[in-house]
Image (spheres, rainbow, N blue to C red):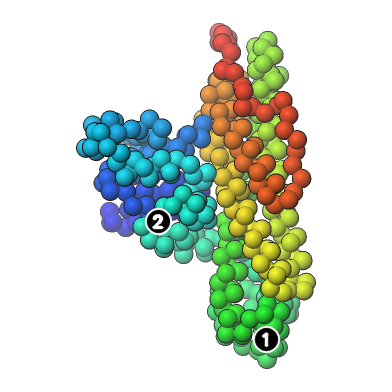
Amino acid sequence: MKATKSSFDFREDNDSLYRMPMKIVPIRTPELSRGRMIKNSALDPALELFRSNETGSGQIMIDELDSERGHYMFGWPLHRLHPDLEILRKLARLTAYDVYTLRIQFRDLGIEPSSVDYLRLSPEKKKSLHMYMRVFTLPLIDLVYGESDSAAQKTDNVIDLFRHPDTRVARENLFKLARGLGVDIGEIPRFLEDFSDIYLSLSYYQEYLDDLTPKVIDMVGELGEMSQNWQLRQDAYTIETITRVQTEINDLLTSVTSRFEAFRQHSDDMWNDIDAEKFKQTKRQVVTAQETVGGVLCGLGIKLNAWKERFPNGDAGGPVARSEMMFSEIVPGLDKLVALERSGREAAGQAVKPAGASALSKARPAPAIRRAR
């Protein structure tokens, strides 16, 4: 039973945008390899060595770990850089922990995963994304099988569907697709594996985006209510910061959402007259976006989930408690997400909102607020 739960926990962590099981990297220290990499609500990377309802979460901040501390905690050499510390400092630069971001950033950071299988979603996660995948696979199914083939449209396995086409029209259309892509008919399954992985990543991020959207709406509304509080309105900087946080979070969600709409439009255009170059352009667009979309959704989700956990409804916590959390956990690192999303839009050649004085990178600490009695 224990091994089963351990395996389940690993798959759940490995499928997550918010945490990474340390087992997937070549860490030698047993205590570390059993842990997982996370970010706190200020988006600082940390190693979580244990977590339970009774004891809470035991964490080590990556930027606080050095050779001396590693020596006393894990028996590392005192006056020599341990290989694990070198890897941890690289891992601290990760923007998100999903398998798609890790594929890109592991390569850029020179980190070799313990197994390439760890950089794939679990079968359970893939199955849960089926409804999202249908949005992207239906145009291809219609292209080959036609809109009237309801059995083909309901399939769970696109690759098998095209590996063994069961109608004469489908086989003819597959040859036409192969000619358009400039490949042999025997290479179509490989193309479809590439196609499935690209659109599985979009489905993966879309699921997180759908989860975060109502949380953004709730938080922006709650911040608006805070700004009407008489006590908080006595400090102009607090009100200014509330407005800035509302704007930044709302803009981040709007920007990422618009990028997904652009993906869908580009995908629809591709199927109108498919050829090899159009598919390559679509693939480049998605792969280029994976790193920044994953990072923005990861950071935004960590902050929104922390806020929701602390204040699960409108009656939980007063305006002062919410203001304190805004300054201590929501504002720190928010400017990094804005910059990351901006870089993603620039890389995609999309319009970006001009950076102005409203950026939160220079926000001062929370003002002293006397609690109402």
Residue nearest the viewer, comparing 358 with 236: 358
Specify the quadrant of the image occupied by residue 308. Answer: top right
What residue do we see at 74% from left, 49% from top? 350
Where's the C terminus, which quadrant? top right
Mark 1 or mark 2: name the one nearer the start of the chain: 2
What residue do we see at 62% from left, 55% from top? 288
Specify the quadrant of the image occupied by residue 287. Answer: bottom right
Query: What's under tag 1, amino acid-wise?
Result: Phe
Query: What's under tag 2, amino acid-wise?
Result: Glu
Question: Marks 1 and 2: which is nearer the front?
Answer: 2
Dot 2 corresponds to which residue? Answer: 112
Spatial separation of the CA atoms under disc 1 and disc 2: 39 Å
Number of other residues with Cα within 10 Å of mark 2, as a class: few under 14, some 14 to 19, many 20 or more: few
Tell me residue 145's x, y (percent): 69, 81
Q: Secondary structure at mark 2?
A: loop
Q: Is residue 308 above or below residue 21?
A: above
Residue nearest the viewer, comparing 66 with 316: 66
Tell me residue 318's x, y (percent): 58, 20
Tell me residue 268's x, y (percent): 75, 65
Question: Which numbered circle lies on residue 175?
Answer: 1
Number of other residues with Cα within 10 Å of mark 1, as a class: few under 14, some 14 to 19, many 20 or more: some
Query: Is there CB contact under 8 Å for labels 1 and 2?
Result: no
Q: Secondary structure at mark 1?
A: helix
What residue do we see at 77% from left, 66% from top? 269
Residue nearest the viewer, comparing 367 with 305: 367
Q: Is residue 186 visible?
A: yes
Question: Which numbered circle lies on residue 198?
Answer: none
